[in-house]
Image (cartoon, helix red, strand yellow):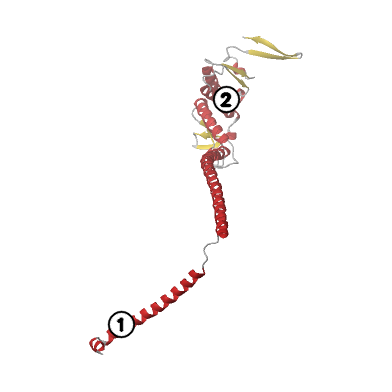
């Protein structure tokens, strides 16, 4: 009664709860102790045969695990070797792929599958033909008194795969171009002989100084008027200094202009050389 009068009500309730919990824990502990004492009294010690069998099983499992570990290590080493080979092959694949890309791009350029749609042969032939016309025009302008110039039609540069290399004539009188087929017979002859001489000049300039020692012109002079014939002969006289010019013609006016000639006479018995000068 004295303790109850001293402690507050809440303190008394706390102490009573602690006493109850201690009593319950003590009871459970005694029960567990009794169970353990019973199990201990019933335990007869380990079974030697079971223990030996378990040890044998453990040793076998250990050996199997060691064997598997060795196999896994070997597999890992093999994978490392394959990875090294794969890295090397991948580097080669990238290199060959880049080279194949360059070759494919080159093939497309050569076959005309490029933005300009120009095949390599058309491009190179166009370049050579433009060079030949440049040489030819140095003579055609003189023979035509500055009226005509030959140029390559640039249609082939505009992606038209069906177009070829065509020549056209720039007429200074009209300031316009026209097809080469619109030239008269004499004008066509002047353009043709200019192109022939231009081709010879181009070959000589690109072939290590190879000399083209002879040029033969078969007919065509009969289509020229007197002034054009005079200009053509003047051009041929100029190039005779470094190459032989052979002319095959029936034009009588040429006899007085050709210092060395062979004349052929037709007879009933056939043709024969009449004289050689």
**Alpha-carbon span between mark 2 and mark 1:** 132 Å
Answer left or right for 26 relative to 178. Answer: left
Q: Quadrant of residue 182?
A: top right
Residue 193 versus residue 2 in the image, above or below: above
Q: Quadrant of residue 78?
A: top right
Numbered tag placed on residue 256 in the rendering: none
Numbered tag placed on residue 196 in the rendering: 2
Residue at image x 39%, y 80%?
24
Any part of residue 158 in sight: no
Q: Which residue is mark 1?
A: 15
Element marked by disc 2: helix
Residue at image x 53%, y 18%?
239
Q: Nearer the viewer, residue 169 or 12?
A: 12
Residue 53's spot in the image, x, y percent?
Answer: 58, 57
Q: Quadrant of the C terminus?
A: top right
Residue 162 versus residue 15 in the image, above or below: above
Answer left or right for 1 relative to 124. Answer: left
**CB atoms at circles 2 and 1 under 8 Å apart?**
no
Q: Nearer the viewer, residue 16 or 94?
A: 16
Element marked by disc 1: helix
* First along the sequence among labels 2 and 1: 1
Residue 173's spot in the image, x, y percent?
Answer: 49, 34
* Label 2 crowd (10 A; few <14 / some 14-19 / many >=20): some
Q: Quadrant of the N terminus?
A: bottom left
Mark 2 or 1: the one toward you:
1
Any part of residue 19 in sight: yes
């Amino acid at each position: 009664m004295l303790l109850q009068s001293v402690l507050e009500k809440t303190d008394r309730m706390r102490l009573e709860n602690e006493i109850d919990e201690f009593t319950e824990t003590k009871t459970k502990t005694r029960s567990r102790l009794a169970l353990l004492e019973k199990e201990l009294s019933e335990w007869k010690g380990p079974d030697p045969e079971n223990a030996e069998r378990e040890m044998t099983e453990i040793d076998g499992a250990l050996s199997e695990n060691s064997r598997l570990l060795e196999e896994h290590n070997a597999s890992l080493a093999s994978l490392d070797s394959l990875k090294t080979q794969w890295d090397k092959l991948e580097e080669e694949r990238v290199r060959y792929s880049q080279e194949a890309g360059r070759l494919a791009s080159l093939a497309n350029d050569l076959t005309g599958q490029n933005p300009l749609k120009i095949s390599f042969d058309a491009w190179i032939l166009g370049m050579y033909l433009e060079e030949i016309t440049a040489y030819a025009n140095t003579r055609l302008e003189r023979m035509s008194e500055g009226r005509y110039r030959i140029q390559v039609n640039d249609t082939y540069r505009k992606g038209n795969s069906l177009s070829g290399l065509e020549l056209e004539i720039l007429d200074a009188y009209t300031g316009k171009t026209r097809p080469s087929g619109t030239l008269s017979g004499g004008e066509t002859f002047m353009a043709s002989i200019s192109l022939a001489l231009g081709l010879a000049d181009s070959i000589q300039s690109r072939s290590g100084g190879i000399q083209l020692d002879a040029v033969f012109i078969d007919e065509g002079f009969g289509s020229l008027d007197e002034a054009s014939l005079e200009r053509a002969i003047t051009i041929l006289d100029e190039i005779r200094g470094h190459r032989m010019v052979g002319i095959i013609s029936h034009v009588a006016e040429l006899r007085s202009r050709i210092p060395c000639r062979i004349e052929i006479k037709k007879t009933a018995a056939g043709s024969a050389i009449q004289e050689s000068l």
